[in-house]
Amino acid sequence: MTWSVASLLPLPVLVPLFAAGLTLALHRRPRAQRVISVVALGIVVATAAALVAAADRGPVVAVIGDWSVPVGIDLVADRLAALMLLVSGVVLLCVLLYSMAQGVADGGDDVGVVGAGTDGDPDEADRRDLLPVAIYHPTFLVLAAGVANAFLAGDLFNLYVGFEVLLAASYVLLTLGGTGDRIRVGSVYVVVALVSSLVFLTAVGLAYSATGTVNLAQLAERLPDVDPAVRLGIQLLLLLGFGIKAAIFPLSAWLPDSYPTAPAPVTAVFAGLLTKVGVYAIIRTQTLLFPAAGAGSERVDQVLMVLALATMLVGILGAVAQDDIKRLLSFTLVSHIGYMIFGVSLAGPASTAAAVFYVVHHITVQTALFLVVGLVERRGGTTSLDRLGGLARVAPGLAVLFFVPAMNLAGIPPMSGFLGKVGLIQAGVRDGSPLAWMLVVGSVVTSLLTLYALVKAWNKAFWQMAPDDAEPGARDEARLPWGMVAATSALVGFSLALTVFAGPVYGYAQRAANALTGGHAYIDAVFPGGGDRGVGESDDATATAKTAKVGH
């Protein structure tokens, strides 16, 4: 086997899985677990960076196992997948470092602490605080492997597997500590996730029965020949399954109750990353399998435009009404998913580029904000805005750490949030349809209300006088653990780097969007000779030769 950059493609999946096994075997050696976890995610980030550079010259394809496409499993890294892989790797690494610092500060070498709930019953708070690091590291690494597999999957079934790996790992992380609240919301979360998985699996089965394949490149070739009603059914089922995972209105009711109860690092990675896996799947399938020129696509796009508008407005109105920072951010998370669907629904290169850029921006900013809120909870003892106050006096640096990503999320110029929104608004104005204009107005209103909600939270938490009966700092600490602050600062710095280097990043997103919406680069990369496009059957082993190759 000749080495090429395609040989790197399995690493973001295999390395975290292998590391998860090692950390599980070394469950009595927390220091070794930490080193292994950091090294594993460091390898993922380095690999993703190499793939970002390589994918800019064209999609990178690796065929896994002894069967060639479409029978075998193929991993594909085009610009979109590589960019998502890199950003997710950076975010996961920062969150891991944050949780490790929290564990060291609170539990020493023997017990990891990945939760910081301190309000309510003291015994309950103590139990929430002391969580077994032996479970945390392997599960976190399995989650990282699931995310990578979803981004690199070259067929629908492998994408489904990635989602299921995510579901298993996220349920364990969500219920860490085993408190009543976490078990309750975890049960709701797993039921919702199973429903979405069932819908997704139904779509996979329908697609296979209609086309004889689940390979994405081959599906793109065959779906135009499928009966329009069946094709529309497949498209709607995929959108429904991915829409639940992405928390698009009205499929988002589960999110604001689920995420805030988890430990701070878990909430951060869930809020920043997991919903974007659903958005990624929508972008991938809508652009590759159901392009704008396809029959019936215009009607579906109009439905998406309505859902995008409702997601933005309902989410942000919910955020404005909250008096708890975690719930406020959870509602803003929902509302800003609407921006991404806004870009997808317009189905053009400019709107898709803006959506891709906005996904990258939102992953980093939303995760950073939840990490900051974890520090706020640690310093103030609560996340209730009515119980907080005066934090700017005792922790001025923390006020800055909250303010910067908050303004970025609100879209204050010249930050990356502003640039992404401008790109979406320009695409909407260029479209010129009544629905597009409604989206433009809705996005501006949502941005203003986001600014109002976040400024209100910042003022209450940092500048108002603390209530007379407010509890002292959760742990009576003079300083926050430097490791937690450093990890949060690194992610805030990364989000600012997206502003500083917005030109190159936006240009990369534009090239990714051009390839997604205007050409056959993905299909040509998977079937470089073109001969297998329309003839291979996933159950026909004789249609393809056995190979063991990694190449592009």
Image: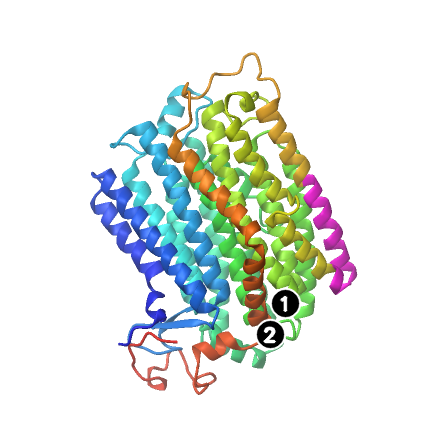
Q: Is residue 198 left or right of residue 68?
A: right
Quadrant in which residue 254 is drawn: top right
Q: Nearer the viewer, residue 435 or 29?
A: 29
Please say whether residue 177 is visible from this viewpoint.
no
Instruction: Give the residue type at disc 1.
Output: Pro
Quadrant for the N terminus, please. bottom left
Mark 1, Cα crowd under 10 Å, few <14 / some 14-19 / many 20+, is: many
- Relative to 201, residue 328 above or below: above
Which residue matches tag 2? 518
Instruction: Give the residue type at disc 2.
Output: Gly
Q: Which residues are magenta?
A: 429-449
Question: Does label 2 or label 1 sit earlier along the sequence?
Answer: 1
Which residue matches tag 1? 349
How far across and how far down the image is residue 423, in percent? 66, 57
Quadrant for the C terminus, please. bottom left
- Relative to 51, residue 193 above or below: above
User: Residue at point 23% right, 42% down?
Assistant: 32
User: Residue at point 44% right, 82% down?
Assistant: 528
Q: Nearer the viewer, residue 434 or 56?
A: 56
Q: What number is the disc on residue 145?
A: none
User: Residue at point 53% right, 44% down?
Assistant: 366
Secondary structure state at the residue bearing disc 2: helix
- Relative to 284, residue 311 above or below: above
